[in-house]
Image: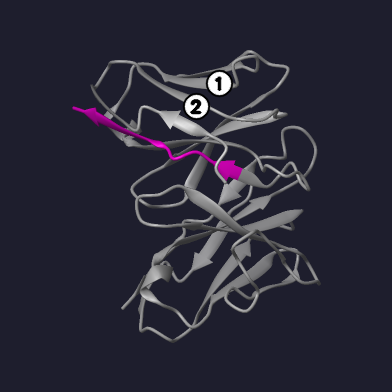
Amino acid sequence: SAVISQKPSRDICQRGTSLTIQCQVDSQVTMMFWYRQQPGQSLTLIATANQGSEATYESGFVIDKFPISRPNLTFSTLTVSNMSPEDSSIYLCSVVVGLAPGRDIQYFGAGTRLSVL
Amino acid sequence: SQQGEEDPQALSIQEGENATMNCSYKTSINNLQWYRQNSGRGLVHLILIRSNEREKHSGRLRVTLDTSKKSSSLLITASRAADTASYFCATPFLGGGSNYKLTFGKGTLLTVNP
C-alpha cells in the first residue's frame, strides 16, 4: 500500500490567483495522477505526472492552467493558475505502487478542497 | 468522457440490510474497480475484479462482473452506519495509453440509517 499526504487540505482563494497543491508519498511509486472532482460530481482525470518530464494532460486540460511537476518518484505538485470560481473543486492525487497484479490498484490522497471567490 | 454509470444515484437503507449498487460501462475492459468516498474526502479502494473473474468477495463486500452485459454489481451485506458514503466504479481509461488511468462513474450515494 501507500500513504499519501496531500497539502493543503483546503483553501479559499481569490479570483486570478494561483494555488499549488503538494502530494507526498511514503514510498517510491510507479505512476502518479491528478484528478478533479467538481461539486456533486464524479472524478475527472487531469493528467499523469511523469517523473522528470512534462506531464501528460487529458482532453480539456492544458499545462498553462494546470502546471504539474514531479521531480522524483515520491513527490508531485499541481498548480491551479489564474483561478476562477469554476475551478472550485476537490483536487486529488493518486498513485499506483507497482504494475504487477495485486499492486496495480490506485491509492488516493485525502484531497484538497478549493473554493475560489 | 465517463465510461461507468452507477445505478441507483442514491440509496437509503436501514442498518443490517443489504445494499446493492450497479455499474454499467461501454467498452471492453481488463478490470473494474470499486471505490468508496466518505463525505468529499479521498477515495478508498475496495475491490478490483478482473475481466476473467465473475465474482469476488472481500469481507462484507461481494462484487460480480458480467462482461457480456458490460455490467458489475457491488453488494454490501449487513450494512452499518459507517458504510454511509458514495461508491464509485472505475474502469481503465477510454482511448488506451495506460491501463492505470481510470475513468469513474457518477457514483451511488448510500445512506445507512441507524
Residue at the location (58% across, 66% down)? A23
Q: Quadrant of residue A71?
A: bottom right
Residue at the location (81% across, 72% down)? A52
Residue A84 or residue B36, whichever sits in front: A84
Q: Is residue A73 left or right of residue A37?
A: right
Instruction: For mark 2, name the chain.
Output: B
Can residue A76 be seen here? The reply is: yes
Q: Which residue is mark 2?
A: B23
Can residue B59 be seen here? The reply is: no
**In the picture, which quadrant includes the C terminus of chain A?**
bottom left
Amino acid tagged 1: Ser
Q: Quadrant of residue B112?
A: top left
- Mark 2 lies on a secondary structure that is strand
Question: Which region is colored magenta?
Answer: B103-114
Instruction: For mark 1, name the chain.
Output: B
Q: Is residue B27 left or right of residue B77?
A: right
Across and down, in percent, residue A51 comes to 78, 67
Across and down, in percent, residue A25 comes to 63, 60
Residue A68 or residue A22, whichever sits in front: A68
